[in-house]
Each structure stands twice: as C-alpha cells, then as structure tokens.
Amino acid sequence: MTILVTGAAGFIGMHVSEALLASGERVVGVDNLNDYYDVGLKKDRLAQLEEREGFTFCKVDLANRDAFTAAMADQDDITGVIHLAAQAGVRRSLTHPFDYADANVTGFLTILEYCRHLETLPHLVYASSSSVYGANSELPYSVGQATDRPISLYAATKKANELMAYTYAHLYGVPSTGLRFFTVYGPWGRPDMAYWLFTEKILKGEPVQIYNQGDMMRDFTYVDDVVTGILSVLAHPPQKTDAEPPHKVYNLGNNRAEQLLDFVTIIEKSLGMTAMRELLPMQPGDVKATYADIDPIRQDVGYEPTTSLEEGLPKFVKWYQEYSNKD
C-alpha cells in the first residue's frame, strides 16, 4: 500500500511514517516546514525518514490547493490518507488566527477534495483534538458529550474538521475517522510543549512556569501508543449504515488523568535535578483537566495504551539530552 501522510515532518507524523515504512508500506510525506517552531528539528525528523526505502517527500502548503494538486500529480497509487498537518498550539491561536484558518480549515478542505476524487481511497484518518471539549467539566471526556462551545480558535478549527469530514462522508461517501488526541509526548516532540520546556529549563537552571498554580491534570499519551492507535484505526474504516454516513470520531488518550506537578517530579527524577517552580494563573484558552474515555476505540479496534508516564517521560528526557548534545 501507499499511504499519504500529511505533516510528515511533524512530531506524530514522523513516528507514523516510520511505523508504516517499518511494516513495508510506501509513504508519501507532505509538509510545508513552516517556522512555528525550529525548522531545524523538522528537517532532522525528515532526515530520519529520507534514509528509509519507500519514502517520498513533497514540500507543499496544503492551503495552496493548486500547488498540492501539482505535487500529487504523479502519485496515482495512494490507498490511504493520514492527515496530521495542522497549525498547532492553543495559545498561539489567540494571536495568529489566520494561520489557523489557512492551515486547519482551508488545508483540510484541500485534503477532503483530494480524497473525494480518489477512487481507490479506503479511509481518511485525520487529527482532531481533545481541545474540542472546551471547558467541559464532566470527566472523563466522552465522544458523546457536547463539543459546540470551544474556548480557543484552535479548538474551533478542529471541531470544524469533524463537521467537514462528516459532510464529505454524507455527500460523497468518503470513509473518515477523526482522532481526538490527548497531550501526546515522547522523543522528537514539539519544543512548545510542557514536557520539552520543563526539561530544557531545568537543565538551564531557569524557572519552570506552571499554570493554574499547578492545579491541572492531563491525559498524557506516549507517542508510540498514539501511533498504534492511528494504524489500528486506519485498518478499520467506518461503514455506512442506514442512519449514518461512513464517519467516526474517537478519543485517543491514555485513559488516565495525571497531576501536572507529578509530571514535573518525574522529569526532575529523570534528570537528577530539582526544578525552580514558578506558579502562575491559568492562561486564556486553557482548561484545568483532560481525561479520555477510550472505551469506543478499545471496543472497535482493540486499542490499548501500554506506556505509563513513569516509563515514557524518561525516554523523552534521554532522547532530549542526546539530541541537544548531537553537535
């Protein structure tokens, strides 16, 4: 099979591409290599993939539909699409709203239109986010709960993706599954995420900024578990029924909420250092707790996360130290 992976130079996209290549699939990776964070990190991830047989890379912005169409003109054997490209970051969406509309809405429409005209496409798997739950205080988050009150533009664009995919499933029969990711972490992660920032600042002897006075909980999900979930879902396209089009949405999390302060403690132990903790108020657009109900995806595709925070965070810390010292 040949799988199109958008956002292939991103954190999750790189790991998904590696897993597909390791299983003998061909991967066409698409990424615009934007400068939201260090492009050097994205290029280093890409270098890992380009060493592998069966990987083809196309540098293109999905918001530019004509450029994407031209880039894909010779790729006539795509049998599945994993759409992970997006403008990430809840807080940045407050200051750069058009970046989110371009990447997350227009870019997704480009993918939907592409899929609509792929006669051989069995399944589109796309990234949604736990952010769609907004300020919902009912835990754990369940896919049956209301998600029509987002508290950040980022969350609104991800909810829009779910609605757009449903529409294309209804109108054109495009089988699609949205995955609401819950705080993914691990090696090759994003520099704007808490686990990276905490590790970096502790090593530099700088204060670690902890919001809401540390009274926060997150469903931290190790990247290998996320990859397993994505590929398991890809192999199980939703079926059209009399009542519904071929579209599903699942939570993809670790099924447990961890205290943010415990998260910091594990990093401290992994580094053998103590953090200077700076306790701050809650940031706009943020939520106090996330916790995924994964029963539906567990029942439908057999997804079962296996990596605890105590096991996964030290793996990130080890990778970070090695990567930071590579030069």
Image (cartoon, grey):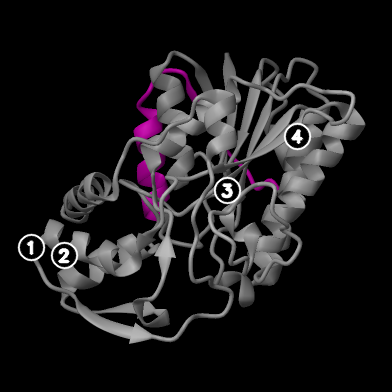
Q: Quadrant of the N terminus?
A: top right
In contact (CB < 8 Å): disc 2 and disc 1 = yes
Q: Which mark is on residue 145? A: none
Q: Which mark is on residue 268? A: 2
Query: What residue is pinned by disc 1?
Result: 272
Element at label 2? helix
Q: Quadrant of residue 34?
A: bottom right
Residue 94 in the magenta stretch? The answer is no
Residue sitting at x 65%, y 58%: 132
Query: What residue is pinned by disc 3?
Result: 32
| Three-letter residue code for mark 2 | Glu
Residue sitting at x 75%, y 15%: 120
Q: Is residue 71 above or below residue 149?
A: above
Residue 75 rendering spot, x and y as whole percentages: 66, 21
Residue 58 in the magenta stretch? The answer is yes
In contact (CB < 8 Å): disc 2 and disc 3 = no
Q: Residues within 10 Å of mark 2 (few under 14, many from 20)?
A: some
Q: Which residues are the magenta region?
A: 40-62
Sequence-first tag of 3 and 1: 3
In contact (CB < 8 Å): disc 3 and disc 4 = no
Residue sitting at the far left: 272
C-alpha distance separating marks 2 and 3: 35 Å
C-alpha distance separating marks 1 and 4: 50 Å
Query: What residue is pinned by disc 4?
Result: 69
Camera-nearest residue between 83 and 43: 83
Sequence-first tag of 1 and 4: 4
Q: Quadrant of residue 183?
A: bottom left
Q: Residues within 10 Å of mark 3 (few under 14, many from 20)?
A: some
